[in-house]
Amino acid sequence: MTDSAWIDAALTSARPQAVGALLRYFRNLDTAEEAFQNACLRALKSWPQNGPPRDPAAWLIMVGRNVAIDEVRRNKRQQPLPEDDQAISDLDDAEDEIAERLDGSHYRDDILRLLFICCHKDLPATQQIALALRIVSGLSVKQIARAFLVSEAAMEQRITRAKARVADAKVAFETPGAIERSERLASVAAMIYLIFNEGYSASGDTAEIRSPLCEEAIRLARLLLRLFQSEPEIMGLTALLLVQHARAAARFDADGQVILLEDQDRGLWNQKLISEGLALIDKAMRHRRSGPYQVQAAIAALHARAEKPEDTDWAQIDLLYGALEVMQPSPVVTLNRAVAVSKVRGAEAALELIEPLAPRLANYFHYFGVRGAFLMQLGRNEEARVAFDRAIALANTTAEAAHIRMHIDRLMRDSQQRSVKAK
């Protein structure tokens, strides 16, 4: 591995802990982030010459803190700290000392504090995601803007507003108690799930650009799992993201068109990610404390375990969606359950299940796409065409619209064939 490669990997891995510790020390997001960036610049200069430190996070925390304090002293025209070379040469003993202090509790608390601040309740979800990707993950504003398909200026403004809200809210930097920590942990998990969905919901023409969001969400979920190794819902969340992302290579064709799950080439699925996810969900279920992420992961696991589409245990998927409806009542959950119902009890039963959802899903693309598919299965082609036309009008991406047009083309072919037979 080249110097630049291992240094980049070390900086990325150490970032959450280092920024978290610097945030605890300075109690200001901008100061902590700037201190870390300055420490990274020194690492790029020092590490290729002196080799990697025993504990990169401890090194970065000590250097970042010293540089920031030095800057404060310079601004106050007080005696500065030693110059770079001397400061770095003094780090050996200091690094050992701070590494000893960074035990498991410090590591856990610092990273949690950082994640909790990014998920502050005063921030809208879009700002939470942007702030976490910038502060915790270290993605550049340009990278985040590209993934969200907005201008750099717009994303910079979004992040700046988020920081300002955190500052105005006078966020407490002390470690939260057990009850508050449990509540805020749910917010962190939701934020990670949203980051993943931002990447996963990309269409064929933007999938490659936004795929890094899925990968970053998985990295954050694994980080959270290291902090809460016995929390089944975090196991479930991580498993869900892994199994879903395992299908990435099979979800679109060469032209960027959507490939439905039952039509995907399962040989393209990433078996390593699936195995990791299946092991996690099995472990989570043994805790017997079921939650929404575990149920969704169990559904994904049933799809992943089926070697062929016809091997899918749709009856079990129907039951799991029923459990999810109880935990998280939502018309979208019921709509997803209807697909399983159609496999188990037929399109008529599925259609009856979703008809009451019409008022709440009147502007939801997938509702009309699913409804059209059920109507087409029942031979109610004119009604199906109306539903598909509505779906196209509501499509969020060109890939979604193209997928629905494929169904309309099929309806037209069937209609023409019936017309020819009638003659």
Image (cartoon, rainbow, N blue to C red):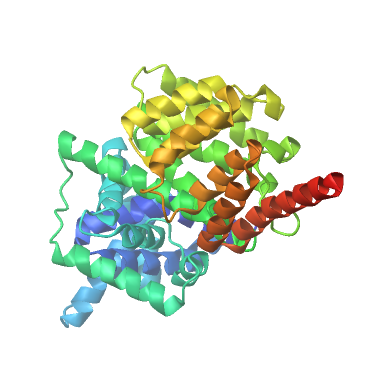
Q: Residue at x 44, y 53 (%)?
A: 195
Question: How many marks are shown on the rendered structure?
Answer: 0
The answer to whether residue 62 is visible is yes
Residue 354's spot in the image, x, y percent? 45, 38
Looking at the picture, tell me which residue is in the foreground, 411 or 12: 411
Residue 38's spot in the image, x, y percent? 38, 69
Residue found at the far front of this picture: 423
Using the image, determine if residue 293 lies above or below residue 313: below
Q: Residue at x 47, y 57 (%)?
A: 11
Where, by quadrant of the figure, is residue 339 drawn? top right
Task: Please indicate whether residue 191 sits to the left or right of residue 170 in the image.
Answer: right
Residue 277's spot in the image, x, y percent? 54, 31
Looking at the picture, tell me which residue is in the foreground, 354 or 15: 354
Residue 404's spot in the image, x, y percent? 63, 54
Looking at the picture, tell me which residue is in the foreground, 35 or 203: 203
The answer to whether residue 92 is visible is no
Q: Residue at x 29, y 56 (%)?
A: 118
Looking at the picture, tell me which residue is in the foreground, 422 or 329: 422
